[in-house]
């Protein structure tokens, strides 16, 4: 019999290996690109593993390699397919799966578009980033615009090692990537991020580092020791250690022992440790036994025992629940309770309105930043703001229509007097070419609006 604690274990590191993805790689002759064949996967086997191991919920993500072979549109299509398939799995098995969406990098503009779609429309629970996408490493300056988008949405970002670029083919022929290069690749990427103060500059992103933090417990003290000399010579910029490290979390996939966990605790705190299985890269029975052994060894260790439930479940619950972004709004429309704020019921003097806005083309991107901010703040902080659903015309994206609903006239008046609305109004006056407000009459008053989307 599985204990109550075991049933609540949350697995933040697992992969849904879709057959369409495997076939895609085979068409490109890339089935062995990561020096190990993709394992077979199906949802029933995954659920059976979870049941046997005592895992209550798993976060799914696309495995390596990055599906880019010179055709950006092709990459975007397979990534979109993967994300939508993952969203269906989450919907079909409520409470069992969450998912972190993949992005079609190295095309940054396409990646931003997909991130917005995945988080805002599909209700993705985070983003999965390869350590490098064909040589474009997380932390590179080219990805700063993407980080701004993810930061605004307070995204959880799961890193996963991919084949280094470049890599010594002779070495990986002897020791496949998973043996050494994956931990080294993860460490390389995080050090690169820290050197550019990426976690510090985008403080609303929470990064999950895989495989027990890889070599970071060794690399970070060394970097701290050498950094002053590098700065003195002008080779590196100052690093805000506390601001960088506080945003890093670590999954324990791949051989976590009490010794490994204690090593991680030299660079982080117990509330930043998470369980991960790496299913299905090892047989289910091996992973089940590994989790059983981890539970036992942590429980028997006097230093770690107080944090057992935190590591196995509670930290992940807190991490993936503490996301006041628009994916939470999507989840509300599937009937799940929101933790952001209780919504007021629609009253007799409630307002349903279409705001038809045309924005000057040169200001569209800037306008969307203002509109996104006011929408997020309003929905998350004002119980009387029920709906803000924006759409843009396909033929002319500068023409935007927003469906708004307010629980009452008083709620509407409070909204337009708010600081965040006034910031939006004053900041976008010069960007708006035209504005038409059209109040609507519900055809069936019994169908009152009691949800919200942005």
Image: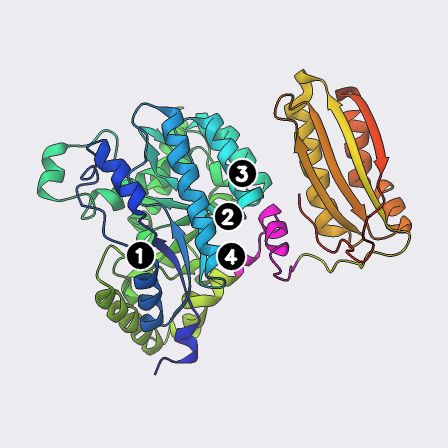
Of the two numbered discs 3 and 4 in the rendering, the one whose residue sits closer to the viewer: 3
Q: Provide the residue designation for mark 3.
A: 117
Can residue 341 be seen in this snapshot? yes
Precedes in sequence: disc 2 or disc 4: 2
Q: Is residue 20 left or right of residue 309?
A: left
Please say if 26 is above or below 442. Answer: above
Q: Quadrant of residue 375?
A: top right
Residue interval drawn in magenta = 318-339
Residue at the image point whose x is 24% and y is 71% from the top: 289
Q: Quadrant of residue 304?
A: bottom left
Camera-side residue of 178 and 407: 407
User: What secondary structure is marked by label 1?
Assistant: loop
**Are the residues flagged by discs 3 and 1 in contact, CB closer than 8 Å?**
no
Q: Provide the residue designation for mark 1.
A: 42
Of the two numbered discs 1 and 2 in the rendering, the one whose residue sits closer to the viewer: 1
Residue 319: assigned label:
4
Residue at the image point whose x is 25% and y is 68% from the top: 290
Precedes in sequence: disc 1 or disc 4: 1
Residue furthest bottom as drawn: 1
Q: Provide the residue designation for mark 2.
A: 124
Precedes in sequence: disc 3 or disc 4: 3
């Amino acid at each position: 019999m599985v204990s109550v604690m075991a049933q609540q274990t949350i697995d933040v590191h697992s992969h849904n290996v879709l057959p369409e993805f495997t076939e895609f790689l085979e068409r490109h002759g890339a089935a062995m690109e990561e020096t190990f064949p993709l394992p077979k996967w199906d949802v029933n086997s995954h659920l059976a593993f979870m049941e046997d191991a005592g895992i209550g919920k798993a976060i799914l993500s696309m495995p390596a390699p990055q599906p880019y072979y010179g055709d950006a549109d092709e990459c975007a299509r397979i990534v979109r397919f993967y994300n939508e398939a993952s969203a269906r799995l989450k919907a079909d098995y409520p409470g069992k799966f969450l998912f972190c969406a993949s992005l079609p990098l190295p095309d940054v503009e396409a990646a931003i578009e997909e991130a917005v779609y995945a988080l805002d429309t599909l209700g993705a629970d985070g983003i999965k980033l390869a350590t490098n996408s064909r040589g474009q490493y997380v932390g590179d300056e080219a990805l700063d615009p993407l980080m701004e988008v993810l930061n605004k949405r307070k995204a959880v970002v799961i890193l996963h090692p991919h084949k280094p670029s470049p890599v010594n083919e002779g070495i990986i022929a002897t020791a496949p990537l998973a043996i050494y290069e994956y931990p080294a690749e993860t460490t390389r990427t995080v050090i690169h991020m820290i050197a550019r103060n990426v976690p510090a500059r985008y403080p609303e992103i929470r990064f999950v580092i895989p495989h027990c933090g890889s070599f970071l417990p060794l690399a970070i003290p060394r970097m701290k020791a050498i950094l002053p000399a590098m700065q003195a010579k002008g080779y590196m910029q100052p690093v805000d250690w506390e601001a960088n490290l506080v945003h890093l979390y670590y999954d324990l996939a791949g051989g976590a022992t009490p010794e490994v966990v204690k090593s991680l605790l030299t660079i982080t705190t117990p509330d930043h440790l998470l369980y991960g299985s790496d299913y299905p890269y090892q047989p289910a029975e091996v992973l089940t036994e590994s989790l059983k052994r981890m539970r036992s060894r942590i429980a028997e260790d006097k230093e770690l025992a107080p944090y057992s439930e935190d590591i196995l479940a509670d930290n992940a619950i807190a991490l993936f629940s503490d996301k006041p972004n628009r994916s939470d709004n999507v989840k509300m429309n599937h009937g799940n309770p929101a933790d952001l704020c209780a919504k007021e019921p629609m009253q007799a003097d409630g307002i349903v309105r279409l705001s038809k806005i045309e924005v000057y083309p040169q200001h569209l991107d800037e306008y969307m930043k203002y509109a996104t901010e006011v929408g997020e703040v309003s929905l998350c902080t004002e119980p009387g703001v029920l709906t803000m659903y924006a759409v843009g015309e396909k033929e002319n994206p500068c023409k935007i229509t927003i469906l708004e609903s307010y629980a009452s006239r008083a709620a509407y008046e409070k909204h337009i007097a708010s600081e965040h609305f006034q910031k939006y109004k004053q900041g976008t006056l010069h960007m708006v070419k035209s504005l038409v407000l059209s109040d609507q009459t519900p055809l069936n008053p019994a169908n009152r609006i009691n949800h919200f989307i942005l």
